[in-house]
Amino acid sequence: MINKSHIVLVLVGENTDNRPWVNYEVHHAKCHGIKVIWTQLPNTTGAPPKEIRHLKPVPFNMKSLQQTIRGNL
């Protein structure tokens, strides 16, 4: 399904950076030129996957997420 996507939104929680499947999906998206954005889930302090740590997180609210997604389509 990632191959058919224009953008991938990563929801970062407590152990997201330790999840092999999340790391695989982020890597796959980036290798295929698919934009990846991330947001921190409320009340969590986990880190995003290594490949996207340099990216600024999108605030976890509907307006910010919608604007960011629309701006990247």
Image (tube, helix red, strand yellow):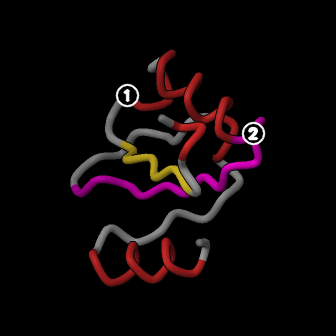
Q: Which residue is mark 1?
A: 15
At a point 39% along the width and 72% down the height, the residue shown is: 65
At a point 60% along the width and 37% down the height, the residue shown is: 3
Binning the other alpha carbons within 10 Å of mark 1 as few (below 14), some (14 to 19) or many (20 upward) gives few
At a point 66% along the width and 58% down the height, the residue shown is: 55
Q: Amino acid at mark 2?
A: His
- On the image, the x and y values in percent for residue 13 come to 33, 40
> Left of 6 or right of it: where is 38?
left
Kindly state the secondary structure of the residue where label 2 is placed: loop
- On the image, the x and y values in percent for residue 62 come to 27, 76
Q: Which residue is mark 2?
A: 32
Nearest to the observer: residue 37 or residue 53? 37
Which numbered disc, 1 or 2, marks the residue that appears first in the sequence?
1
Q: Nearer the viewer, mark 1 or mark 2?
A: 2
Q: Name above or below for residue 19 compared with residue 14.
A: above
Kindly identify which numbered label has been placed on residue 46. Answer: none
Q: Name above or below for residue 56 compared with residue 41.
A: below
Magenta stretch bounds: 30-42
Q: How many marks do you count on the picture? A: 2
Residue closest to the far left:
43
Binning the other alpha carbons within 10 Å of mark 2 as few (below 14), some (14 to 19) or many (20 upward) gives few
Kindly state the secondary structure of the residue where label 1 is placed: loop
Residue closest to the far front:
4
Q: Amino acid at mark 1?
A: Asn
The quarter of the picture where the C terminus appears is bottom right
Queried whether the magenta region covers residue 36, the answer comes back as yes
- On the image, the x and y values in percent for residue 7 come to 55, 56
Q: Name above or below for residue 1 compared with residue 19.
A: below
- Give residue 61's quadrant in the image: bottom left
At a point 59% along the width and 22% down the height, the residue shown is: 24
> Left of 72 or right of it: where is 47?
left
